[in-house]
Each structure stands twice: as structure tokens, then as C-alpha cells.
Amino acid sequence: MQSINNIQDEIIEDFSMYDDWNDKYEYLIEFGKSLPLIEEQYKTEDNRIHGCQSKVWLHGEVKDDNLYFYADSDAIITKGIVGLLVKVLSGHTPKEIADSDLYFIGKIGLQEHLSPTRANGLVSMIKKMKTYGIAFQAAN
Amino acid sequence: MLNIPQIRADFPILTEKIRGKKLVYLDNGASTQKPQAVIDAESFYYEHQYANIHRGVHYLSQIGTDLYEGVRKQVQQFINAKYDHEVIFTKGTTNAINLVAYTFGRKFINEGDEIVVTEMEHHSNIVPWQMLCDEKKCVLKVIPLQADGTILLEDAEKLITPKTKLVSVVYVSNALGTINPIQELIALAHKNGAKILIDAAQAIQHFKIDVQAMDADFLVFSGHKIYGPTGTGILYGKEDILNAMPPYEGGGDMIKTVSFKGTTYNDLPFKFEAGTPNIAGCVALGTAIKYVEELGVENIKAYETELLNYATEKLSAIEGLKIYGTAAHKSSVISFLLEGIHPYDVGVILDNMGIAIRTGHHCAQPVMDHYGIPGTCRASFAFYNTKEEVDVLVEGILKAKKMLS
């Protein structure tokens, strides 16, 4: 398994190929569409993160000491970013997740999606992923 | 006739580049941009005339007081209030509605009394009444929305009864653009002995309002939606009603005398204006209203109607696009969805093309629930917008549709 930072660096490199927003979003949209991220049974109110505009669902579970995430969104661009976050964090130890520094979002020019005015649930999603990390770390 | 190129030159922000593209600003329902004259008025006041107002004997305080009170008179004339002391400066529409809920509501609305709103209200004309109902055990009644985004007068007739103490309704829906039959609602309220509050936040910048001709009891609006500064707003109330209401916030300016034995309150309008107000903002609001009046409210209405009709025609022609709010009487707002596409995604794509629209529930969640949708994309127009900008919007929507389908 690659480290969290290795995966982030790979994503940054992938995105460096796109020099205009059009290509970047086309990629994000296609990536979002290609991901059947969460099973319907996990789309519960408990797993729902309240953004104002798009809905995000996040479910986390531990298998063999690693924390795995399953997530989804009803907006496709949000889903693409959700997919990237899952790709980066899922499958690592709770401690690695809790301690992670998610620098790739800024580097690939998607920082604006984490602005509170976007109200898309992504900021809360990252917070919740880390909270899962901290909680499972304590449980272990 | 409006000279649009000349008007556009008055608004410095309209020449801004957004992400390298020409700004197409179609979020006027949320807030309007400011002409240079308004920006200059606020700066000039701070640079040359600033001091705290009221009760200052010195020169600057006098000038500030004259300017501030001058704007009150100006607003009085703009909405044709009978007296200038019927015009209360507030922070905005939300603040004005809360003021009425807190004062008129707490004094005159009691257990079992009814307050009537419509299903298309902005949250700021729902929540203050819900809070009051929780506290006073009064009842909130809701005039339901029809599929086209209008209300039926026969529903209003059933819901507005002698039990009704207050009807609080939006003049123009921010989410749908519907213009409500306000004159009929005023008549219904008065026939049943109720007072009526009109939320004119989306109306005052689009057409002429005459509170005396309408016989409105309360009328509220925000300064920032009529080309003025944020943090300014107006509560109009009839003199006798305002006089009967207790004060809102306690503090400076709203008192006559203060002692630990008891305090007496100031007269209108100061009774409702505790603390140092947004003086510079109010001064510049005066400039904004002057700007609108010089263009001519009727000219504005005619041009914006033409723009709305053009945009409605162009957007309706896009396959898979559905417009929410198709009332015969509408003002400057088009709410829409592309089939199978989340409004957030459309907003993000348009944003990357320099087009500013609003997406989401527009602080009117009951409207979205009514249609069973998560939100809409909303383009809202002002007199500085052009048909060319509508064409850019259409191109943007087509591109978003292609990318997201």
C-alpha cells in the first residue's frame, strides 16, 4: 500500500497534465461518474453530512487494523472530489488518517471547493474522516 | 429608455475579469452591485464629514445628522410614507422582520392567535414567526403554493380569518420570481382586522412602491439589494402602530431619560434605533436611491421585463431545462434545473466561465420541498444586465449540460 502522501503526489501529477479548467473538470466529472462509491444501505441519515447544497454520505469501517471509507454525493463534481479523498485516505491506519495533511486539494486548484460558501459538505466530510481516524485510534 | 452602456460604466465591478473571463453577474437577487456614486458617497462621508450623529453640538456631528435624517426623508418620499418618522433604519430585511416579531408580535399576538404567511417565504419571514409561535403559543398558517409558483386567493380567503393577527407575505418570491397579488392580500387582512407586513426585499428595486396607496401596515426591504451598502435596511410602519409597539433593543438614542428608578423611551423613529447606526451606509443608501430615481423606476421595470422575457424565451428553448416559477406576473428571476443534473454542478461550471448565478435552496427550503427538488439554479437580473449576457448564460448552460450529462 502506498503512503497517503505518495497517493496525493500521484494525483497532483495526474492533474498537472490539465492546463485549463475544462479538462480538469471533465476528468473530475468522469472520475465521479466511474465511482459506485457507496451501497444504498449506507446512505442513511446517520451517514449523511449536511452541506447546504449537495448531499454527501460517508461510512467508515475498520478491517485488519486499517480504516476504509465508502462515500457518495448527489452532485457529480462533489462526488469526484469525494472520490479523490477516499482514494487518498481509505485503507490506511486510523493514526495515519488522523495525522494526515491533505495538501493535494490546494495543489490541484480545487481549494475553492473547500470554502464554506460552497456549502457542499466537503469540509465536514474531511473533518468526519479524521474524526473516524481519531475514534478508531482510541478504540484500538 | 435606459442607456445601458452608460449605466454599465457606472458600475466599476462589471469590468472585472473572473478567472480570466468577463464577469457576467446574474446573482442580483442575492445582492446588487454598487455604482461608483454609492461607493464614493460612503468614502466621502468618512473622508470629510464623519462624526457620530445626534446630540453633537459640533459641526461634523451636525452635518452627519443632517445627512442621515435627510436620507430618512428621502426614503419617506421614495415609498410615499406619510411621515419621515415612519421610516426606521435597520440592518436589513431580516432585522426589520425580527424587530416586528419581537415588538408587535410579543405585544399584540397571543395564545391561539394566527399569523399567516405563504409557502414561498424566505426563511427570514418564517423563522421569526416560528420562534414567536413557540413562545406565545400562537399558530402559523401557510397559504399553499401552486404548481406554477403562485398562490390562490381562495386559499388566502380561507386562511385569513378574524383569528388572524398578522399576515406577513413576500411581495416578490426570491426563489421563483412570482409577484404576489399584494393589494388583494392587504384587503383580506384588513377586512379581518389583521395587520399586514410586506417583505419587499425583491420588489423595491424593480418597481414603484407607494405604501399609502397600498395601505401597507409594515413594509421592509434591504439597502444592499437596491444598489446600496450592506448592513442597511428599512422598516416602514404606520405611525399609530409603531407608537403602540414597545421598543426593540435598549440602549443609546432610543431613550428620553434614564434613571435607576425608571427609563422613558424616545419618540419615533429613535425608539427603534438603539446604538450608533450604520451612518455611512445610510448616507450611501440615499445616493443609491437617488441613482434609481434618476434612472426612473418605470424605465427600470420596462427594461427588466424585456430582459426577463428574452431570457425566459431563450432558456425555455434548451432541451431538458425546466423553469420553476411560471407565474404570469414575475419579476427578474429565473429558477431552473437541467434534467438529471444537480444544480451545484451547473453552478460550478458556469462559475468557471465567469458567470455568477446562485444555486441551492435560496433560503426557501419549503419551496424546494414543494417541488421535491434539492434546489435550483437561479439567474436574477438587474438593469445593468444585457441580452448579450443572457446569450452567454445560454452558452454556459449548454456547455454545462454537455459536460455533466
Image (cartoon, coloured by chain):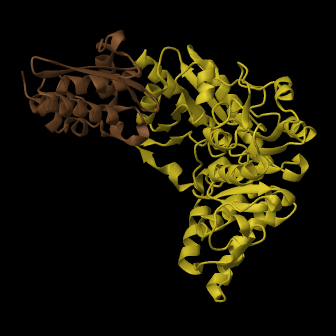
Chain colours: A brown, B yellow
Indicate left or right for B63 with B378 as reference. Answer: right
Indicate left or right for B167 with B177 as reference. Answer: right
Asked if residue B20 shows in the view, the reply is: no
Asked if residue B353 shows in the view, the reply is: yes
Q: Choose top left, top right, bottom left or bottom right for residue B135.
A: top right
Q: Is residue B56 above or below residue B99?
A: below
- Please identify the quadrant where the C terminus of chain B is shown: top left
Indicate left or right for A60 with B270 as reference. Answer: left
Q: Is residue B386 above or below residue A49?
A: below
Residue at 57 percent across and 54 percent down: it is B11
Q: Choose top left, top right, bottom left or bottom right for residue A130.
A: top left
Residue at 38 percent across and 32 percent down: it is A121
Residue at far front of view? B261
Residue at 66 percent across and 47 percent down: it is B4
Picture coordinates of residue B157, whole percent (x, y): 87, 28
Residue at far bottom of view? B58
Picture coordinates of residue A116, whole percent (x, y): 39, 41
For this rendering, which residue is in front, A16 or A131? A131
For this rendering, which residue is in front, B156 or B223? B156
